[in-house]
């Protein structure tokens, strides 16, 4: 019989807790706190994400059903919904934001060599946002419409591993294009965006930062053709041109040449017009890059289905941001485990397994793969092998 740690505790061991303690000290998260620390709060919220808890009462009931195992989960404080609610309202959300960023910095090198379906060595990011609608009476700070509140998650996704490298949480009124002002641009990287981010002045700042973008043109965009390149129309390409903007203010915003590629999608029989500032990349590669943008849509769909970000445990802005960043931390932590243990399982399958076995005492690698057997493990986890 395996006498080691609980499955949930094994999962949490992959997190950099020295960084978490440093952040708690930085933001004085445990100042004047006696019984329910920031670590207890994070573990409760992470447990809720992994096991699909729906409310504070649900979290409390589930944890209190196993009182003898709470210490071994890492929980030291008194578990109650009032203590967790107060922590969500008062503990600075930036603790969990910076902790998620630390996990992202660990995860990205692990997925650096993963293929993205496009023959390109540079980093490729997909930028998009998703809206989570809320009740206006409960979330009055999240302005959206006259009868409805909402928050937006503006996300920059590294397509190698689908790791979110930037997430900005705003009210529903913030336009997508404003997210371009918040990015720290990486020279040489590709930023793939839909038409909602078509702002020529902002795109020119991206161009000046030595980064590349791929986006779609709007139907009313006006161009002057400067140069036409030959294309193979049997591949779906219609034209590959270098163009200049003809509208005065657009030209003021982006005074240099752009590349305009027109492609007919054979699956939907739809004509697509792409714009990019990379003048040498093969035209079909530009089209494939834009197609890979769909991964960010799948990411939003995945986290809404498998993490708790549509129903919140608190109504304040601090509570909402704390829960979202905890969800991001859990997602990235599971992605780290997948690479560290060299697993072929999808993140969805891993979460399904972890959700029903958090209180079990079984080696994590055995639980997720079945490759190890109980006979390979020592009877006492603290007993060292002599031979």
Image (cartoon, grey):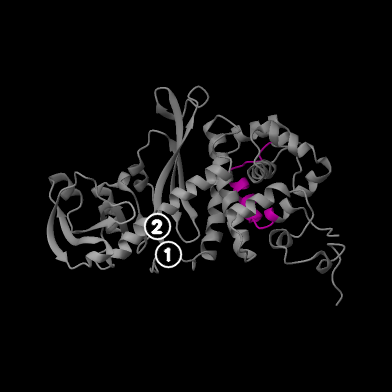
Q: Which residue is mark 1?
A: 117
* Left or right of 330 in this view: 133: left
Nearest the camera: 77 or 215? 215
- Return the x and y of residue 214 as percentages of the image width and height: 31, 56
**Quadrant in which residue 39 is drawn:** top right
- Return the x and y of residue 94 as percentages of the image width and height: 54, 43
Q: Is residue 19 magenta?
A: yes
**Quadrant in which residue 347 is drawn:** bottom right
Q: Is residue 149 above or below residue 266?
A: above
- Answer whether residue 35 is visible to the viewer in this image: no
- Answer whether residue 250 is visible to the viewer in this image: yes
Q: Is residue 153 above or below residue 212?
A: above
Q: Which residues are magenta?
A: 11-32
Q: Which residue is mark 2?
A: 292
Nearest the camera: 217 or 57? 217
Real-space CA distance between mark 1 and mark 2, rounded to the nearest whole angstrom: 8 Å
Q: Is residue 374 above or below residue 323?
A: below
């Amino acid at each position: 019989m395996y006498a080691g740690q609980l499955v949930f505790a094994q999962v949490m061991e992959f997190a950099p807790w020295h960084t978490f303690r440093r952040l708690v000290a930085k933001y004085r998260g445990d100042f004047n706190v006696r019984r329910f620390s920031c670590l207890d709060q994070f573990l409760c919220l992470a447990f809720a994400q992994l096991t699909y808890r729906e409310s504070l009462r649900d979290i409390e009931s589930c944890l209190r059903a196993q009182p003898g195992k709470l210490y071994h989960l890492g929980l030291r404080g008194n578990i109650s919904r009032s203590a967790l609610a107060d922590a969500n309202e008062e503990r600075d959300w930036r603790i969990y934001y910076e902790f998620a960023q630390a996990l992202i910095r660990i995860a990205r090198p692990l997925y650096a060599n993963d293929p993205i379906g496009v023959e390109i060595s540079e980093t490729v990011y997909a930028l998009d946002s998703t809206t989570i609608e809320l009740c206006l009476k409960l979330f009055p700070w999240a302005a959206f419409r006259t009868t409805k509140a909402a928050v937006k998650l503006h996300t920059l996704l590294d397509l190698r591993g689908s790791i979110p490298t930037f997430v900005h949480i705003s009210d529903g009124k913030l336009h997508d294009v404003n997210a371009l002002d918040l990015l720290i641009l990486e020279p040489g990287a590709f930023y793939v965006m839909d038409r909602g981010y078509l702002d020529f002045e902002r795109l020119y700042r991206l161009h000046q930062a030595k980064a590349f973008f791929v986006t779609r043109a709007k139907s009313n965009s006006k161009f002057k053709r400067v140069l036409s390149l030959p294309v193979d129309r049997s591949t779906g390409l219609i034209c590959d041109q270098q163009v200049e903007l003809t509208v005065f203010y657009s030209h003021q915003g982006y005074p240099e040449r752009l590349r305009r590629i027109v492609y007919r999608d054979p699956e939907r029989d739809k004509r697509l017009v792409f714009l990019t500032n990379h003048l040498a990349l093969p035209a079909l590669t530009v089209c494939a890059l834009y197609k890979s943008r769909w991964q960010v849509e799948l990411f939003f769909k995945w986290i809404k289905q498998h993490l708790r970000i549509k129903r919140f445990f608190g109504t304040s802005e601090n509570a909402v941001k704390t829960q979202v960043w905890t969800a991001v931390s859990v997602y990235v932590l599971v992605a780290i485990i997948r690479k560290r243990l060299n697993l072929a399982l999808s993140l969805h399958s891993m979460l399904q397994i972890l959700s029903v076995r958090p209180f079990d005492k079984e080696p994590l690698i055995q639980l997720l793969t079945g490759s190890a057997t109980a006979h390979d493990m020592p009877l006492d986890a603290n007993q060292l092998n002599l031979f």
